[in-house]
Image (cartoon, coloured by chain):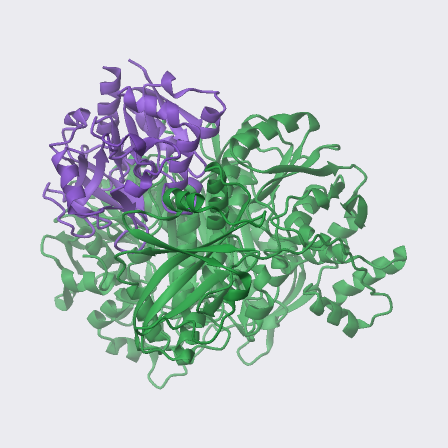
Chain colours: A green, B purple
């Protein structure tokens, strides 16, 4: 069969400078330029090539831009495409590398080419795409392979060829109905574990034994479909067994003596849900029950918020992993019948300047990971039309082998519009994307650690997203919700149909036919169809009578829909293939059969730990040059401007972004939180804020302090832009190492205890959370990382505060108490200091925040900024940069508890502190509003563009604006 | 004076709701209609007084921004769209809608060439302008200042009496021409509608990020020879209320463009 190959090249393309730069990082210095071409392959199902006329039509209407591109055609016979030696050299020192997606990976361009061709009247085409790189320079064969592997091709989802690549048509295999029986009877513990490992089930010995004895009792062997269903349902990812297990927790002295032993009946129940119950807020609509937490917004609408992680997929395929991370969390919002309206992202990467030779085997370079993740997030969020408005980026060597990608989404839904009860006889309807072999074993894969070999073994766990199909789902579900066409809805996330149908049918039982599932290509076995985590799919329980109306909506929005079976009412899960049962399990065993583990945890109490350094902490602090360290902090990648990343996300779409990521006259100062006004609610001035708190540096020293600080930071950020402190809800996302190891689990326990203490102190409920465990690479855990996200009501969007200084002559106040708390601080990190007290709970923080909020509503606050990493001086410098105004402050009289040196005041990271700018005419009113609270008049905004810091009559430093800006913004824009 | 405005939705459109709000504030009656509904005859273009192709990522921009939507226009609504344009009613393409109008050969249009707008002819081969990848190589979201080009054939723009301040959010907004003559023809025939400027009104002069994408001659939007079809990359629909202004000013609303178009069509 002949195949047409079309090469489309940009005419004036001078090549991609980024590629040459990245090549140098890989040690290939001789690459001079790299030009990229799109390759399209077309063949006909009938075996005939398209005519010349048809080909020209395809190029003119779909493939070639006549202003910027040219095309070259050739006809390939299958036999001619062998990758012969020498073919990759096209003369004049130009080498060719071609890269194509592996079979089964979503290729939206190929699909749109086929659809477009059909619109042009050219039917029955099969299309595929690839990318060609033409590399100029004195390059050896080894150089070309290095560039291909290190830069141009990700082996997890792609393959490459030096010279012409075989057209990436694939998957011509026939339907496969094979179902295996897995014989567990008589296997001993080691053999059971071996079975779990070989099938990538991630089940432990106790769980395998439970399954073995269940099948012994019913007298048969499990099918592979059943075993996979159990492994998925019982996976850490789906059931969160660590957070539900009983833990024997020992607090130890530094020398290992047990100081205190307690038994914890489930972390989730004891600390997280308990906090929500204790604060008992009437405006919480749904916490920990649905796919997202829900709070009240106004008389008509509620808000849903969810944050997920997609760490392991992003480690292997950064673009696809982050892409589908956004896709997944947005579906969580659709799954509570809400219209998604915004996204957030918090990213943790390894050092971007890591020398190539220090990169561990099997790890993508952190710069490649970061580029791919950022592009993946932007691609999905932008294409869905969702503003990505809040986040953070943290760089630390602890994330080298295991980056973290937190993806959040917010949705709006009319009150009481989310139905959650499927009824007996309801049809089980799948909507959206087709099912393929993508994402098999994602649920169990994320419940295992990464190793050097993971790239090779788990390729099928990684997918690429198709945001436009998901966009169709958003529209369709909103219309179906408004038409009250379904009784329950859930997304097909980890565990695919198995998880979605299994959970939805937990009470009733379900009977489902796998042959009716729309497939991307034939050849999937029944268990693969059942477990596939193909993206962009939702499952609904639909009364029979509503099917025609739902089908009409699906046709309107170009969404594929299929009726797969019904909720039976007998409490059994029956999965069929061509009518034949391939799984028959009582829902009771599936959902209640899991033996919850009992785990051991211990944690060393570091209080009073003495610094191990030669130079005592106090002395080291005293020797620190404040000016130098401030500039070093401002240019630290975790503190410096993230503008280069954030501007690639659309933060304006939907027209409701009132509080933006960047503020001030140059629109480049950092914001504390986003403020959003949903479309459809412009009749009043209420809005909502989104913020985050995360500090892994602190967690390395004390996980309890990290949790308290993360809650305070998220809360304080929301208050800083104008959220009502009595209307803030929290989300917890834990990314941790292997919880079966007592030290990892002990740290997790301490973090949960911190969450409880802080949430109850702030009267803020947790409404949703997620844990991602087993974040380890080759036995090394990531720094335990807790992200707290906050969503808060902003009563008046016209009173929103920004962080940039506004007017010379205005007064700058410091709010909150500064303590000598440098343990786990940025200063300690930069100076490589160990020891010191970690930031603690502020005294009566809620009182201070409430008073500040009143002052804001009275219009007394000109600007407000929270103090976090780097403490007072970093916050003040950021306010100056944002406003392009100077400030003159005197820290000599700042009240401080046991402060040993001025530098402690400058860089301590005590919680509960903010800086505010107040006009002189408002000073009395402000001070009256804050009466009895720890506020201190620090200085004033100045017309000169210098940040001047005094200690009484002594000038500590004076820094000109230009130095501040260039430290913080680096060499980026302006 | 309640002008019915059809806002066309194809798979992947996403700024339709904001465009609808802008129309409402400007005195029009917006109606978001899916192209499948036009195909099926559930609604008809000629029943409306104005057409908006909103921003978004039609079909994921899988084969280039707006390319698939442009083909949809030809394949599904060709005749009614051409009648609509020929009748002189206003058509506004924003961002992806602008890309679509350009890729479909409707902007700047070529009145000399009969063949140009036939559904299955070969018009794109003759196309002389395009919107291609931003010079920065990536998607850009930032606020820009826009001035109406004084020689524009889109007469209603005379009512836009201030520069417009509004965001861009695109990866393929770099307006380019086939050659120097193509640019001259645009400029001499009054087909340039908007250019990027600085805050004080001086030409951006290609300076990034005032000109956020590298567009030739700072061109942000163009119109057809009749002046009733207008396209631009920035999003005036995202600045219809002063509270949306990141610099806190009261003027320079994108709403003025919607008012001007709706007023002229209602006139």
Residues B7 and A64: in front is A64
Residue that sits furthest to the top in the current view = B1
Residues A943 and A664: in front is A664
Expressed as whole percent of the image width and height from the top left, the position of residue B155 reads 17, 25
- Taking A467 as reference, is A483 above or below it? above
- Taking B54 as reference, is A644 above or below it? below
Expressed as whole percent of the image width and height from the top left, the position of residue A956 reads 16, 69
**The C terminus of chain A sits in image quarter:** bottom left
Q: Is residue B35 left or right of residue A443?
A: left
Q: At x 55% / y 29%, what residue is drawn?
A: A553
- Taking A810 as reference, is A349 above or below it? below
Expressed as whole percent of the image width and height from the top left, the position of residue A934 reads 31, 53
Q: At x 73% / y 38%, what residue is drawn?
A: A565
Could you tell me if residue A308 is visible in this image? yes
Q: Is residue A795 left or right of residue A665?
A: right
Q: At x 30% / y 77%, what residue is drawn?
A: A30
Could you tell me if residue A694 is visible in this image? no
Residues A339 and B121: in front is B121
């Amino acid at each position: 069969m002949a195949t047409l190959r079309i090469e489309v090249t940009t005419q004036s393309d001078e090549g991609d400078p980024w590629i040459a730069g990245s090549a140098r990082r890989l040690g290939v210095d001789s690459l001079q330029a790299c030009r990229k071409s799109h390759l399209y392959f077309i063949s006909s199902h009938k075996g005939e090539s398209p005519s010349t006329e048809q080909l020209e039509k395809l190029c003119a209407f779909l493939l070639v831009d006549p202003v910027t591109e040219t095309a070259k055609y050739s006809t390939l016979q299958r036999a001619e495409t062998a990758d012969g030696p020498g073919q990759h050299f096209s003369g004049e020192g130009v080498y060719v590398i071609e890269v194509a997606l592996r079979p089964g990976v979503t290729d939206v361009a190929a699909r749109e080419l086929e659809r477009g061709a059909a619109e042009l009247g050219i039917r029955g085409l099969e299309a595929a795409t690839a990318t060609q790189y033409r590399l100029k320079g004195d390059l050896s064969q080894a150089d070309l392979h290095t560039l291909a592997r290190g830069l141009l091709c990700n082996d997890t989802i792609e393959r490459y060829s030096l010279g012409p690549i075989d057209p990436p048509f694939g998957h011509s295999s026939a339907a496969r109905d094979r179902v295996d029986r897995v014989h567990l009877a008589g296997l001993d513990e080691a053999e059971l574990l071996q079975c779990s490992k070989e099938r990538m089930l991630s089940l432990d010995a106790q769980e395998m034994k439970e399954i073995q004895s269940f099948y012994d009792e019913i007298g048969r062997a499990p099918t592979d479909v059943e075993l996979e269903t159990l492994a998925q349902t019982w996976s850490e990812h789906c059931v969160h067994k660590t957070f539900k297990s009983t833990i024997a927790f020992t607090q130890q002295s530094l020398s290992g003596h047990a100081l205190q032993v307690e038994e914890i009946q489930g972390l989730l129940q004891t600390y997280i849900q308990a906090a929500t119950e204790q604060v008992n807020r009437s405006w919480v609509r749904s916490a920990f029950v649905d796919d997202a937490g829900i709070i009240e917004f106004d008389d008509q609408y509620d808000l849903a918020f969810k944050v997920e992680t997609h760490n392991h997929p992003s480690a292997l395929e950064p673009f696809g992993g982050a892409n589908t991370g956004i896709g997944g969390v947005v579906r969580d919002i659709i799954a509570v019948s809400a219209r998604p309206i915004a996204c957030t992202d918090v990213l943790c990467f390894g050092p971007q300047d890591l020398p190539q030779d220090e990169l561990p085997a099997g790890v993508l370079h952190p710069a490649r990971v970061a580029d791919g993740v950022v592009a993946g997030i932007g691609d999905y969020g932008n294409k869905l039309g969702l503003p990505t408005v809040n986040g953070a980026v943290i760089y630390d060597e602890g994330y080298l082998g295991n980056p973290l990608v937190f993806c959040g989404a917010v949705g709006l839904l009319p009150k009481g519009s989310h139905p959650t009860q499927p009824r007996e006889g309801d049809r089980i309807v799948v909507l959206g994307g087709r099912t393929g072999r993508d994402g098999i074993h994602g649920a169990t894969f994320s419940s295992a650690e990464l190793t050097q070999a993971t790239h090779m073994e788990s390729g099928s766990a990684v997918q690429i997203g198709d945001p436009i199909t998901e966009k169709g789902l958003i529209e369709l579900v909103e219309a179906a919700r408004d038409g009250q066409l379904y009784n329950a809805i859930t997304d097909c996330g980890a565990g695919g149909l198995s998880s979605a149908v299994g959970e939805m049918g937990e009470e009733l039982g379900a009977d489902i036919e796998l042959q009716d599932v729309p497939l991307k290509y034939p050849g999937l076995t029944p268990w693969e169809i059942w477990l596939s985590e193909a993206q962009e799919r939702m499952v609904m329980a639909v009364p029979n009578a509503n099917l025609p109306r739902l089908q009409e909506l699906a046709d309107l929005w170009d969404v594929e829909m299929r009726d797969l079976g019904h909720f039976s009412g007998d409490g059994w899960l029956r999965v069929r293939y061509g009518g034949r049962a391939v799984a028959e399990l009582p829902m009771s065993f599936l959902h209640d059969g899991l033996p919850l583990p009992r785990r051991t945890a211990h944690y060393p109490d570091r209080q009073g730990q003495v610094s191990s350094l030669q130079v005592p902490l106090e002395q080291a602090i005293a020797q620190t040059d404040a000016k130098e360290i401030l500039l070093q902090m401002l240019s630290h990648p975790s503190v410096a401007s993230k503008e280069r990343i954030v501007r690639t996300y659309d933060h304006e779409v939907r027209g409701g972004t009132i509080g933006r990521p960047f503020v001030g006259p140059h629109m480049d100062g950092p914001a504390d939180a986003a403020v959003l006004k949903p479309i459809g609610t412009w009749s009043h001035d209420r809005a909502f804020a989104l913020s985050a708190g995360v500090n892994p540096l602190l967690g390395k020293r004390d996980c309890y302090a990290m949790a308290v600080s993360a809650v305070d930071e998220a809360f304080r950020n929301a208050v800083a832009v104008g959220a009502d402190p009595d209307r803030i809800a929290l989300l917890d996302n834990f990314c941790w190492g292997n919880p079966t190891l007592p030290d990892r689990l002990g740290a997790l326990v301490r973090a949960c205890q911190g969450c409880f203490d802080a949430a109850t102190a702030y009267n803020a409920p947790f409404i949703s959370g997620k844990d991602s465990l087993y974040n380890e690479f080759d036995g090394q855990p990531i720094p335990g990382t807790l992200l707290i996200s906050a969503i808060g009501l902003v009563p008046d969007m016209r009173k929103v505060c920004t962080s940039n200084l506004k007017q010379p002559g205005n007064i700058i106040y410091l709010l909150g108490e500064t303590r000598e708390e440098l343990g786990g601080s940025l200063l300690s990190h930069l100076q490589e200091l160990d020891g010191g007290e970690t930031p603690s709970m502020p005294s009566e923080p809620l009182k201070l925040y409430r008073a500040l909020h009143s002052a804001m509503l009275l219009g007394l606050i000109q600007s407000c900024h929270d103090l976090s990493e780097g403490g007072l001086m970093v916050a003040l410098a950021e306010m100056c940069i944002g406003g392009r105004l100077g400030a003159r402050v005197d820290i000599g009289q700042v009240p401080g508890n046991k402060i040993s040196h001025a530098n402690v005041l400058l860089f301590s990271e005590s919680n509960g502190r903010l800086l505010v700018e107040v006009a002189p005419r408002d000073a009395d009113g402000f001070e009256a509003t804050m009466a009895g609270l720890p506020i201190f008049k620090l200085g004033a905004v100045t017309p000169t563009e210098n940040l001047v810091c005094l200690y009484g009559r002594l000038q500590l430093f004076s820094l000109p604006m230009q130095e501040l800006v260039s430290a913080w913004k680096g060499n980026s824009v302006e | 004076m309640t002008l019915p405005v059809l806002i066309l939705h194809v798979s992947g459109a996403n700024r339709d709701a904001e465009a609808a709000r802008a129309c409402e504030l400007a005195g029009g009656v917006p109606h978001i209609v899916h192209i499948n509904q036009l195909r099926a005859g559930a609604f008809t273009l000629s029943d409306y007084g104005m057409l908006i192709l909103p921003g978004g990522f039609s079909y994921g921009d899988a084969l280039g921004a707006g390319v698939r939507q442009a083909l949809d226009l030809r394949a599904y609504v060709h005749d009614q769209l051409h009648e609509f344009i020929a009748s002189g009613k206003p058509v506004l393409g924003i961002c992806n809608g602008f890309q679509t109008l350009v890729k479909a050969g409707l902007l700047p249009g070529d009145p000399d060439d009969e063949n140009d707008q036939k559904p299955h002819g070969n018009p794109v081969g003759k196309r002389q302008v395009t919107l291609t990848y931003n010079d920065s190589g990536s998607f850009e979201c930032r606020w820009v200042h826009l001035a109406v080009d004084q020689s524009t054939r889109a007469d209603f723009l005379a009512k836009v009496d201030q520069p417009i301040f509004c965001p861009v959010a695109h990866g393929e907004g770099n307006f380019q021409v086939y050659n120097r003559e193509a640019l001259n023809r645009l400029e001499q025939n009054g087909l340039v509608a908007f250019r990027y400027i600085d805050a004080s009104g001086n030409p951006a002069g290609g300076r990034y990020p005032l000109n956020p994408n590298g567009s030739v001659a700072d061109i942000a939007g163009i119109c057809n020879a009749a002046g009733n079809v207008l396209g631009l990359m920035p999003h005036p629909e995202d600045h219809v209320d002063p509270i949306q202004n990141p610099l806190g000013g009261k003027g320079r609303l994108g709403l003025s463009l919607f008012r001007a178009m709706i007023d002229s069509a209602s006139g």
